[in-house]
Amino acid sequence: MTDVLPRPVVHEEHDHEVVHEEHHARTGILNWMTSTDHKVIGMSYTVTSVIMMVIGGAFAEIIRAQLSSPNGTLVSLAQYNELFTMHGSVMIYLFAGPFAFGGLANIIVPLQIGAPDMAFPRLNALSYWLYLFGSLTMLSGFFTAGGAANFGWVAYAPLSNSLNTPGSGADLWIGGLLLTGFSAIFTGVNLCATIFYLRAPGMTMFRMPIFTWNMLVTAILILLAFPVLTAGLIMLYCDRHFGTHIFSVAGGGVPVLWQHIFWFWGHPEVYILALPFFGMVTEIIAVFSRKPVFGYKGMIFATLSIAALSLGVWAHHMYTTGVVLLPFFAIMSLMIAVPTGIKMFNWIGTMWRGQIWFSTAMLMAVGFLITFLIGGLTGIFLASPPLDFFTHDTYFVVAHFHSIVMALVLGAFGGLYYWGPKITGYMLNETYGKIQFWFLFIGTQVFTIPGYILGLDGMPRRVAIYPHDPQWQTLNQISTLGAILIGISTIVFVVNVAVSWKKHPAGDNPWDAHTLEWFTTSPPPHHNYYRLPQIRSERPTWDYNHPDHKTAGHGHHPQPQPDEVTVT
Amino acid sequence: MKVEAKVLLGLGAFFGAMFIVYWHYSNEDAGGVMMFGGMLLGFLPGGYYYWWSRRMKARPEDNPYATQAQGAGVVGSFPGTSIWPFTLGVGCFFMVLALVFGIWLVIPAIALVFWALVGGTAEGRRGGKV
């Protein structure tokens, strides 16, 4: 039968004698296939997207190995084109986005607002299946005669038309993106409806955790951006197979229109990728500094202004086409630095005079701040047209966005170490976690920083071979070394999961954390909550556990610094 | 409900302003059309929420002093396990594969999609298995 759910029981006192409904979680593949529980679906998303990260990472290692010598012969030029196309596609479309809004958000957002499930559980399940089948469709290009798509992850017209890129790999790429695009749209609808309609009593909008706020804004951005991409892909498919000339000059079309459509999706997509990780980092920094988030409302308005501005900056990827309104896009792009700067300030403000606990999650979050700052500042250079004309399509751009996305990877692992105990019920090993952090953090800098120098020196991106130049070769080899360190860090993570598998039970609230998800059991029961605390601030679990140090209203934060912190 | 409405209306207003500036100064149409669409996406649901927020009592989740008891009652009806999302997903998968491997795949694809839609709707009416 369909569950008609009553509200969880009222709970004021510290009594744990609540009669629990018995729910026997069935196991087996049929249960997994038919589950509509947001935690099961979120876990499927998380595992699938981490596998995608490993696949995309393997492509990256091959690319870096090829580039470690000027005339590398590891792969052919055609294979190299497939590899960098699929590396970008897998990482952007199949890892970073789905990991955040399909994986962690799916599990954590209903828990953070006290909801029993997502608003539309069956639509949620459909999202996962579309994502999985879309991923398989895109990757199956490698098994076709012509190989996988090889026009870059941006598929610029006219390179992506049927004359320049024949073969079914490109069509499978388009098909896979259609499926994953719809999956993202459905998840966006689901997140919006859940956050608008399923909050617990007292959980007003301005008491929602920052992660939930960021996921709401991400969901709105998904709804703005992804339909544009889907429409563009259908136009591209029509151009390739049905004889239309939307993107080809020959029939009166406009090739640069593809770039407009693609980047109108593509730039908000950057924030669809980044905002969830901003949210994770905010939660982690607040908990491990043992303080409320500094500037809670400022954080939310910064997120909203990033979302608003992100819709007006797409053509900063197209400065060198020479047909875009340069001042408009330069001003809008530079303005995004302001809300991002506010966030950076608030993260530091949260840590300021806090009792910082350098757990693995906190290290990852601090690593995120540093790496994101490097990527963000070089982004400000690129937002300026005169500098962009000089550095466009060089390794400077590659290094810039890899600083950004590697910061997101640091944030992703931070989120896994922070919420992993809640999701699985068991702690991850901290020693292995710290080893992983140092490999990942140092590897990231060793990998990206030579790219900036190479780019300023004029090395173009997307090349498999380059002129003999001792400096270029050395810098490329350093970069390859960084990629190897990052690869090792992923192996350390896998080892960590194996080592800590069902070893140390986490308890309900191992980090003495603030937000509602830490009030329920780890892992949470079916439909999440047997009981809920009164919600009087944005830190209900903290207020419940520390009646003497309750969170004051906005602008009146005392410094809640407990004498000792119990860790299990 | 008011905060939700204001967030969406605010975003819509900003996109509208950007649309006017961009439309006026650029010599390109696609971006303006897309920003106009963004404005609508802010205004349509935002306006709906605003309209409702003036006609309804504040919900417990909008009341900062609500107790859990005030939210007592039914949260909603949630489906149990269901095979139809998977079936619908496989149908869509076949439909995309038909773009590449041959138009005949459309037949099983449409059959699966139709089957899943009927099955899912029927299940929603009588309640599935938990």
Image (tube, helix red, strand yellow):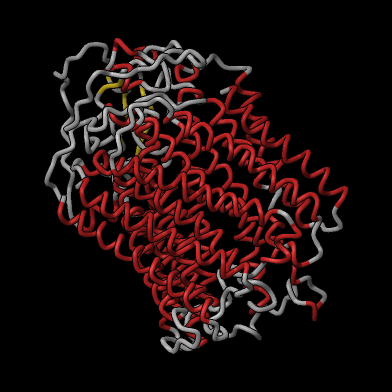
Q: Does residue B103 appear left or right of residue A442 in this picture? A: right
Closest to the observer, A401 or A533: A401
User: Is residue B71 visible to the viewer in this orientation of the structure?
Assistant: no
Closest to the observer, A468 or A218: A468
**What x and y, as percent, mark residue A383?**
69, 53
Q: Is residue B30 above or below residue A8?
A: below
**What x and y, as percent, mark residue B8?**
63, 33
**What x and y, as percent, mark residue A477?**
43, 75
Q: Give the number of marks.
A: 0
Q: Does residue B82 appear left or right of residue A169 in this picture? A: left
Specify the farthest residue to the front.
A470
Task: Locate the C terminus of chain A by quadrant.
Answer: top left
Q: Quadrant of residue A520?
A: top left
Closest to the observer, A451 or A108: A451
**Which residue is found at the position 30% from the left and 50% from the top?**
A43
**Which residue is found at the position 47% from the left and 55% from the top?**
A183
Q: Does residue B50 appear left or right of residue A343 in this picture? A: right
**Which residue is found at the position 38% from the left and 53% from the top?**
B119
**What x and y, as percent, mark residue B75?**
38, 26
Task: Locate the N terminus of chain A by quadrant.
Answer: top left
